[in-house]
Image: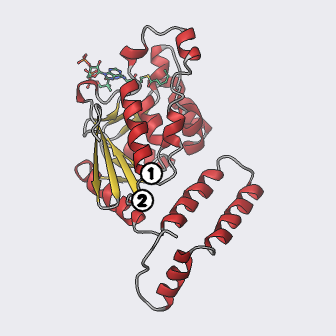
Amino acid sequence: MSYETILVEQRGAVTLITLNRPQALNALNSQVLADLIAALAAFDADDSQRCAVVTGSEKAFAAGADIKEMQSQSFADMYGHNFFAGYDRVTATRKPWIAAVNGFALGGGCELAMMADFIIAGDNAKFGQPEIKLAVTPGMGGSQRLTRAIGKAKAMEMCLTGRMMDAHEAERSGLVAKVVPAAELVDEAMKTATAIAAMAPLAALACKEMVNAAFETTLQQGVIFERRLFHGLFGTEDQKEGMAAFVEKRPGNWTGK
Ligand code: HXC
């Protein structure tokens, strides 16, 4: 399938999705959203694919929601059509996916990166929620996900001043999992994704669900949820294979069952 605003490539069990609107620094318009939803749904539905990487260009992961598309919208347009609600379908992706960020990840770009399971940043990455400079606010979850990722003090400061945070500060603050040289970003993210893709698929789904549950539940309920999923994995063939492979000192061979 071909898309208008993204490039999609399968490398083994990893799907690489590259935002491709260079003329607008990958600003996220409705077409990008439609393309992303379709590509991530196709990735989720394809049993040969186990992990995805979403990246942009060396200059910009994405410089935000498309300001030119939003400029003339009224409250009735935005509220009536529940503008940005489509991003709920992006976050509904069940398999693991990584945001590989070089350059600007601003506004909706930062918010899209935070929808990923984790972020790997190139050392030239710049994160920010500059919407306040346009007299609006984050609208794709930024005020919530940034606060959960880096805490109130820094999130509030970022949202109120609109300043950018560089890759190293983002790593220190817990926004990104690791920083790599910009030129090696996609290779490094693909390596990490390939390692995840080699894990037993049901265990990977379960890991993602339980870590995400930490943001939605109390500690006690989260621990119970984890334990139930953990118990459930003992009903899988891959658990038997994984533990047998350990005992027999050989790599596991997964069926995804
Ligand atoms: C539409 C955008 C854009 C955006 C850049 N462009 N960001 N178009 N929406 N978010 C376009 C520019 O208009 C320009 O097009 C081209 O991309 C190159 O951008 P320049 O500004 O010329 O590049 P540069 O000088 O290198 O500056 C890079 C930049 C700057 C610092 C990232 O582009 C910038 O500040 N962009 C806006 C960042 C922002 O405010 N993001 C938040 C958006 S609101 P032309 O045609 O002139 O060449 C948002 C809200 C989410 O995300 C939810 C609430 C509403």
Residue 87 position (above or below residue 51): above
Is residue 36 found left or right of 230 in the rendered image?
left
The correct choice, above or below, for 200 with respect to 60 in the image is below
Observer-nearest of 28 and 200 = 200
Quadrant placement of the N terminus: top left
Cβ of mark 1 under 8 A from ligand 1: no
Label drawn at residue 254: none
Residue type pointed to by label 1: Ala
Q: Nearer the viewer, residue 169 or 14?
A: 14
x and y, in percent, of residue 156 in the image: 58, 31
Position of residue 137 in the picture relative to residue 165 (left or right):
right
At which x and y percent is residue 101? 35, 43
Residue at the extreme right of the image, as rendered: 220
Q: Position of residue 60 (x, y in %)?
A: 30, 35
- Image mark count: 2
Q: Circle 1 — which element?
A: helix
Q: CA distance from mark 2 to mark 1?
A: 6 Å
Seen at 29% across and 32% down, the residue is 5
Instruction: Give the quadrant of ligand 1.
Output: top left
Q: Residue at point 47% right, 54% down?
A: 96
Q: Quadrant of residue 230?
A: bottom right
Can the viewer see residue 164 in this picture? no
Relative side of 58 to 142, left or right: left
Which residue has dot 1 on it? 45
Residue wearing tag 2? 47
Helix, strand or loop under label 2: loop
Question: In x, y percent, where is residue 169?
Answer: 43, 44
Q: What amino acid type is highlighted by mark number 2?
A: Asp
Cβ of mark 2 under 8 A from ligand 1? no
Question: Which residue is rendered at x = 51% and y = 63% of the image?
Answer: 204
